[in-house]
Amino acid sequence: MTKRTLGGTNRKVIAVSGFRARMKTKQGCKVINNRRRKKRKNLSI
């Protein structure tokens, strides 16, 4: 029998590391600002 491929739920990913989730905390805001400073195309998921 073959093994299953790695799976995950998009809802959980967004709840943990989405833009709104990041902006809720002080550390998350720092992450977003650092990514803005580096001119990242995607700030978050």
Image (cartoon, rainbow, N blue to C red):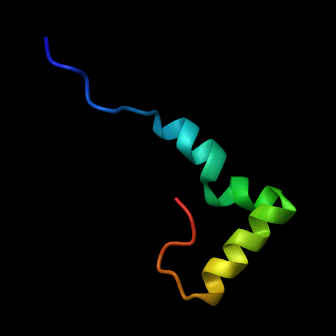
Residue 4: % across, % down: 25, 23
* Viewer-proximal residue among 11 and 32: 32
Q: Position of residue 10 (x, y in %)?
A: 47, 40
Residue drawn at (71%, 59%) of the image:
22
Q: Is residue 31 above or below residue 13?
A: below
Which residue occupies 71% across, 79% down?
33
Q: Position of residue 14 (x, y in %)?
A: 57, 47
Query: Residue at coordinates 77% horizontally, 69% vertically from top-left?
Result: 29
Judge from the rendering whether residue 21 lies leftward or rightward of residue 13; answer left or right.
Answer: right
Expressed as whole percent of the image width and height from the top left, the position of residue 44 reads 56, 64
Q: Quadrant of the N terminus?
A: top left
Q: Which residue lies furthest to the left in this view?
A: 1
Q: In this view, does 11 lie above or below 41?
A: above
Residue 7 in the figure: left or right of residue 15? left
Residue drawn at (63%, 83%) of the image: 36
**The quadrant where residue 37 appears:** bottom right
- Seen as rendered, the residue at the extreme right is 26
